[in-house]
Amino acid sequence: MLAGLNIVQTEDLGEGNIKTTILNHEQLTGFVDWYNKWLFGKDEDKITIEEHEMAAVRALLFYGRPLREKNDAGDPEKDKWVTVDLTDMQNNSMRDLNVQFNVNDCDGLAEKGFTEEKVSGANQNLTMKFDYDELAKVYPYWQIIYALKRVS
């Protein structure tokens, strides 16, 4: 499960021995710190990305990455909020991500506060604004949670 996320690598040494190597120590320790805070935090502060929302988050991050890098080009403290075009995402997601994205797939994320509500942008396309850095931080942690749930 964690091997599939490129966090650990397992190697069968034979005779029932298995070697496990941590490939991404920073992500694993970051997850443990974040999960402890999330798990033992106040219930009203807990915001969950549901498993069915993970594809939408992946799409937001994919299409938001170039915008965030553009924001970051001149000033590292530049605005971490990006505005993605949901209509373009819907039109291009099958080609780019091999997943069908719908402009309504992010509605639950907006209700929880991960993103702002969608608005009508240029050419009547729907757009959505979100904190790229925050979503990019928690997305891999939710991947780990759902990978661990599949095991148990």
Image (cartoon, grey):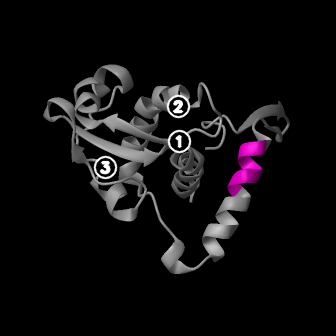
Q: Compared with residue 67, is residue 147 higher up or lower down, i.e. above or below? A: below
Quadrant, the C terminus: bottom right
Q: Nearer the viewer, residue 127 or 148?
A: 127
Label 3 Cα crowd, 10 Å radius (few <14 / some 14-19 / many 20+): many
Per the image, the residue denoted by label 2 is 71
Q: What residue type is labelled 1?
A: Asp
Q: What residue sits 66% from the left and 37% below the top?
A: 3
- Residues under numbered marks 1 and 2 in contact, where contact means CB atoms less than 8 Å apart: yes
Per the image, the residue denoted by label 3 is 106
Q: In this view, does 12 lie to the left or right of 65?
A: right
Quadrant, the N terminus: top right
Q: Compared with residue 96, is residue 147 higher up or lower down, i.e. above or below? A: below
Disc 1 from disc 3: Cα separation: 21 Å
Q: Nearer the viewer, residue 71 or 25?
A: 71
Q: What stretch is highlighted in magenta?
A: 26-31
Magenta span includes 130: no
Mark toward the viewer: 1 or 3: 1
Mark 1, secondary structure of its residue = loop
Q: Earlier in the sequence, mark 2 or mark 3?
A: 2
Mark 3, secondary structure of its residue = loop
**Residue 59 image point, x, y percent:** 39, 36
Quadrant of res 12: top right
**Residue 135 image point, x, y percent:** 51, 48
Q: Compared with residue 59, is residue 42 higher up or lower down, i.e. above or below? A: below
> Looking at the rendered structure, which numbered label has been put on residue 79?
1
Disc 1 from disc 2: Cα separation: 7 Å
**Residue 117 image point, x, y percent:** 29, 54
Label 2 Cα crowd, 10 Å radius (few <14 / some 14-19 / many 20+): some
Quadrant of res 103: top left
Q: What residue type is labelled 3?
A: Cys
Q: What residue sits 46% from the left and 29% below the top?
A: 67
- Residues under numbered marks 2 and 3 in contact, where contact means CB atoms less than 8 Å apart: no
